[in-house]
Image (spheres, grey):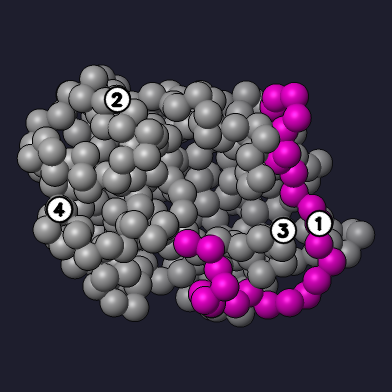
Amino acid sequence: MIVLRDGRAGIEVFCVRRHASSSFLGGAVVFPGGKVDAQDGAEVWADRATEPPERARAFAADAATARALCVAACRETLEEGAILPVDGPLSGDEVDAVARELAAGAPLDGVLGRRGLKLALSALVPWARWITPEAEPRRFDARFFLLSLPPGQVGRHDGYETTMSFWAAPREVLERAARGELFLAPPTSCTLELLAAAADVRSAVALAERQTLSPICPRFVPGDGAEPPYLALPGDPAHELRERRVAGPTRYVLRDGRFFAEESCARGSPIHIEQEREPGSTTSFDVLRTNSPSAPATPDLEE
């Protein structure tokens, strides 16, 4: 979930850092989110949540799955970032209370029901869909949503799955990555580059509504000794899909353990992939020797 707010100097985005020992992207700075679980698709959400945006249907084969994706995005954002969109007022302290009940094993629909609240799925704005390259041993089919920070809420990390949180302008996050203070995965960097052009949350929402929601599945191209390996996005000459699916750079080149956006190399905007952040960090990028083309979404992808 890409949570945004209007700050004094412009748009700000909420970021969290994954725990260093996480099995996937340990130590990375990301947007809150996670996997869909069985309860996210329960029929009770037809009554306990507002209707998802129509564009969310592009993320799934049917309306029920689209709703489950939206519920999962809200639940995970609550768990990792203490932010929850509902159809009524909910203070930061009340969000914390909901999160504690959820952590104790109470179902989210029941917790909201006792408070007379519904999950505000209508507040979510579909942003993009990214699929991990086929070369990766563990693959994910990730849907991204925008959310304007609900009134009265602030956001914070949970100290378990996420170990740090902060609000910052998108360009500031990219600059901190360039200085080696934090590291970003390519979808995060790409999203921040796009958001950096938005003057406020309203502009970001308008940008989201113009974007295609077709899957973005980078192709990993191994180096040949003379040239470094890189990730090619749709629209890049090295990708089998010739049509762009996202604005900005179409290639992320791996140099010295970092990915650099091809069009940003001159000004040094790296995406740090292999860099020690905390003791025991699991984050790394393994150069896989394969020429396999990227694949569209398949049932074995984790959502």
Q: Position of residue 291 (x, y in %)?
A: 78, 75
**Figure quadrant of residue 28:** top right
Query: Reading the chain from its start, which is encountered first: label 4 or label 1?
Result: 4
Between marks 3 and 1 in the image, the one whose residue lies nearer the viewer? 1
Callout 4 crowding tier (Cα within 10 Å): few <14, some 14–19, many ≥20: some
Determine whether the residue tagged by mark 2 lies in a helix, strand or loop.
helix
At x 20%, y 52%, the residue is 121
Q: Position of residue 225 (x, y in %)?
A: 92, 59
Q: Disc 2 designates what residue? A: 96
Residue 207 at least partly seen = no
Query: Reading the chain from its start, which is encountered first: label 2 or label 3?
Result: 2
Q: Position of residue 12 (x, y in %)?
A: 34, 30
Q: Disc 1 designates what residue? A: 287
Q: Disc 4 designates what residue? A: 48
Do callouts 3 and 4 mark residues in contact (Cβ within 8 Å)? no
Query: Reading the chain from its start, which is encountered first: label 3 or label 1?
Result: 3
Determine whether the residue tagged by mark 1 lies in a helix, strand or loop.
loop
Q: Residues under labels 3 and 4: Cα distance?
A: 45 Å
Determine whether the residue tagged by mark 4 lies in a helix, strand or loop.
helix
From the viewer's perspective, is 144 left or right of 120? right
From the viewer's perspective, is 255 left or right of 134? right
Q: Disc 3 designates what residue? A: 230
Q: Residues under labels 2 and 4: Cα distance?
A: 20 Å
Q: Which residues are magenta?
A: 276-303
Disc 2 marks a residue whose amino acid type is Asp
Secondary structure mainly formed by the magenta segment? loop
Callout 3 crowding tier (Cα within 10 Å): few <14, some 14–19, many ≥20: many
From the viewer's perspective, is 216 left or right of 68? right
At x 21%, y 25%, the residue is 94
On screen, residue 283 above or below 297: above
